[in-house]
Image (tube, grey):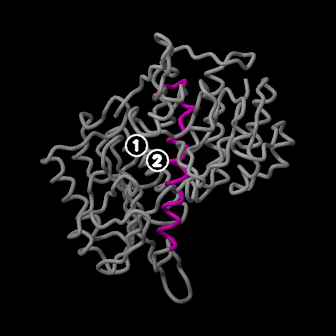
Amino acid sequence: MRLAVPREIAANETRVALVPESVARLVKAGFQISVQAGAGERASFTDESYVAAGATIAPTAAATYEGADMILKVQEPRATDSGGHETDLMPMGAVLIAFLGRDAKSPAATKLAARRITAYSMEMVPRLSRAQKMDALSSMATIAGYKATLIAAGKLGKIFPLLMTAAGTIAPARVFVLGAGVAGLQAIATARRLGAVVEAFDVRPAVKDEVQSLGATFVGGELMDQAMVDAGGYAKEATEEQKAKQRQLVADRLKQCDIAITTANVPGRKAPVLITEAMVRDMKPGSVIVDMAAESGGNCELTRPGEDIVKYDVTIAGPLNLPATVPTHASQMYSRNIVALVTHLSTKDAKLNLDFSDEITRDACLVRVEQAAGEPVAAGKAS
């Protein structure tokens, strides 16, 4: 089976779907791999390193896609600068793996179906024990949680750790993390490594022990509710009564913290607003908010996606695509997730094997193309 790895064309996307380490593993397993020239350079992987790993370097996107059975990307296909579309370059009937979202009726999914391309979305990999190696959402959340803390540290006019100096004692920074999923836990761990005093809140009972194991204080235990957790382990949207209690807790903790890092997302929906303008007004001068949910609307009412603003002497950062700001390790982790999924979808002799009776193969498929009366039929999962 021939795999194609194009250079990402999305603005500010620095990651690559396969790193040389993974190429070598797949080539050894019998795959042929074509990598577009320069595909890994923004993540510090040279064309020479891909050649050494066994890949063929293609000069253009069209040459990369030619004859491919499976295409490996980071971002969904999009319009090119020349006025065309990446999907138009993909061979009819190929398989695509990328971050494609959950909407089988999105413009990208529609184009893929028309091209008879079976598409696997990394966001839809089911949360199963045997699918953990394919869990790219967790991999990227780990990177994002780490980087969000560094962003906060860079914008705060204080240092994180407790210091006892000749000039007197310097009190540690106080960090409040809203949401203790993978990103939140990594933000907590990073803040603790930097020496901050950390508090965290989440409605899911299962995360309390994890927060405490990292040396942070779990607050709002009385608001935890297992009914707030869906089958995938994500927090559900709260009732109005629950929201009111959560808002009061958040408002109280924000008044005391130096940094707030928000991570709350509900898959397929706008991010819940956890920090109102009134709460920001009551924060200490010089405080910092890093809103990791900026891409889905933001957890802070004042967040502007992709911008840093200052309001009421509080800096509010709305970073986008945080994993792409740490491209080397983000690519490495994503590549390993991709290898696990490619291996799952293939036979031992490197041939495509889409067994839709398998839960992973079925549930991770956003666009499934089947032949019916000579015409392609798309079937996927919409959020």
Category of crowding for the residue at label 1, using alpha-carbon neighbours closer than 10 angstroms: few (below 14), some (14–19), many (at least 20) = few
Identify the residue at image location x=46%, y=56%.
188
Q: Quadrant of the C terminus?
A: top left
> Within the magenta stretch, is there residue 130?
yes
Q: Is residue 357 visible?
A: no
Q: Is residue 224 visible?
A: yes
**Three-letter residue code for mark 1:** Asp
The boundaries of the magenta stretch are: 127-154
Identify the residue at image location x=50%, y=48%.
141
- Residue 349 falls left or right of residue 7: right
Say if 193 sits above or below 371 in the image. Answer: below
Residue 310: x %, y % from top left: 36, 77
Q: Which mark is residue 27?
A: none
Q: What is the CA distance from the residue labelled 1 to the residue labelled 2? A: 6 Å
Q: Which mark is residue 209?
A: 1
Identify the residue at image location x=25%, y=60%.
250
Q: Which residue is mark 2?
A: 213
**Three-letter residue code for mark 2:** Ser
Say if 189 sits above or below 132 in the image. Answer: below
Residue 79: x %, y % from top left: 53, 48
Mark 1 lies on a secondary structure that is helix
Comparing 266 with 109, the one in front is: 109
Task: Please state the total of marks drawn on the protein image.
Answer: 2
Identify the residue at image location x=50%, y=41%.
137
The reply to whether the C-beta atoms of the residues labelled 1 and 2 are less than 8 Å apart is: yes
